[in-house]
Image (cartoon, rainbow, N blue to C red):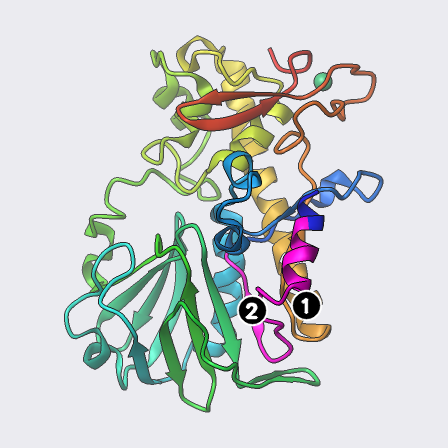
Amino acid sequence: MIAEHLATVRNAGHLPRIKYAVIVFASCFCNPAAGSMLPKFLVGISAFVAYFDGLTIQSTLVYMPELPEVETVKAGLVPVMEGRVIDRADVNRPDLRWPFPDRMVERLAGTRVQSLHRRSKYILVDLDSKETLLIHLGMSGRILISGHTIGDFHHDHPTPAKHDHVVFHMEGGVRITFNDARRFGAMDLMETAKQDDHWLIRDIGPEPLGNAFNESYLIDRLAGRNSPIKNALLDQGIVAGLGNIYVCEVLFRAGIHPQRKAGEISKKRVATLVPIIRDVLAEAIVAGGSSLRDYRQADGELGYFQHVFQTYGREDQFCLTNGCQKKIQRIVQSGRSTYYCPQCQR
Ligand SMILES: [Zn+2]
């Protein structure tokens, strides 16, 4: 049904037909573990949400970029940004979610990008001016790369589009366009040396793929907590970058009921969450990377990635566990949909 909506909207011409650009969409949803036997009913792109205002699907399935999607976008930016000078930046409005930093255009012009990295859902671009550019995709942010040749494919610059809020003109003619229809995204500039103290970053917990996130850490942080495990894992102060979709998948894989109180889960079971979280995220990152390559090698249109989740978005469909006859249920926790199997998750 979602795919049908997509097809309708695309055919109606509401979406730009993009032959010219590699688009690194804010979201890619790929799950290699799910396998091709599963119905490919779920197509998700947060960028498309903007085009669905007024459609009912928005209330039940809203895709926001999570850690793997941001990592994929970052990976798409590295080859066109690292080591290159930002010749010019066009900033077409005063703000996104928050105002742009003072003199952003002047502070970016002529700086050379030294490296890109990711912290939680933020892309951090270290510049040779000793400042760091923070990019947050928000809900609908997407990044288009044009003027770039990958293999045999050259992607010409697109016609400027509505919601193209920031354009980076890179040395060598590459253009990086940040388009954000809903403007929940953000950009900021900070001293590189003080980036860990930035107000958006300083309270974020350890990276789930880093060493600081381990079994004893998680056991310690969940001890005594009365909140449901779903909410605890969404708490960015406990672990960075986990969002609604991947937490649902993690809890399904762990067999833990999303409403179970975090502090009442045995240490042994909590410990199992760590490798599961790492696996779920790592698989999605790998899939995102291969999707990038696939789209680059096709016609340059990086529209959306098909992703099949085991629970997310599968309300009333049969659980995918072998031998389980139950259907996936949806409940709302703290205003967010949770999908789970009442049989497999206890
Ligand atoms: Zn089940």
At label 1, the amino acid type is Tyr
The stretch in magenta equals 5-26
Residue at the spot 40% in from the left edge and 84% down from the top edge: 170
Q: Residue 109's x, y, as percent?
A: 26, 83
10 Å crowding of disc 2: few (<14), some (14-19), many (20+): many
- Mark 2, secondary structure of its residue: strand
Q: Is residue 186 above or below residue 150?
A: above
Residue reaching furthest bottom?
Answer: 172
- Mark 1, secondary structure of its residue: helix
Rendered-image quadrant of the N terminus? top right
Q: Is residue 250 above or below residue 12?
A: above
Q: Is residue 51 above or below residue 253?
A: below
Answer whether residue 25 is magenta in the image: yes
The residue carrying mark 2 is: 23
Residue at the spot 72% in from the left edge and 18% down from the top edge: 327
Rendered-image quadrant of the C terminus? top right
At label 2, the amino acid type is Ile
Q: Is residue 59 above or below residue 139?
A: above
Relative placement, left or right, of 105 versus 31 is left
Tell me if label 1 and label 2 are in contact, CB under 8 Å.
yes
Residue at the spot 63% in from the left edge and 45% down from the top edge: 283
Q: Residue 197's x, y, as percent?
A: 19, 50
Of 339 and 211, nearer the camera is 339
Q: Residue 328's x, y, as percent?
A: 67, 21
Of the image marks 1 and 2, the number of the one nearer the N terminus: 2
The residue carrying mark 1 is: 295
Relative placement, left or right, of 44 versus 111 is right
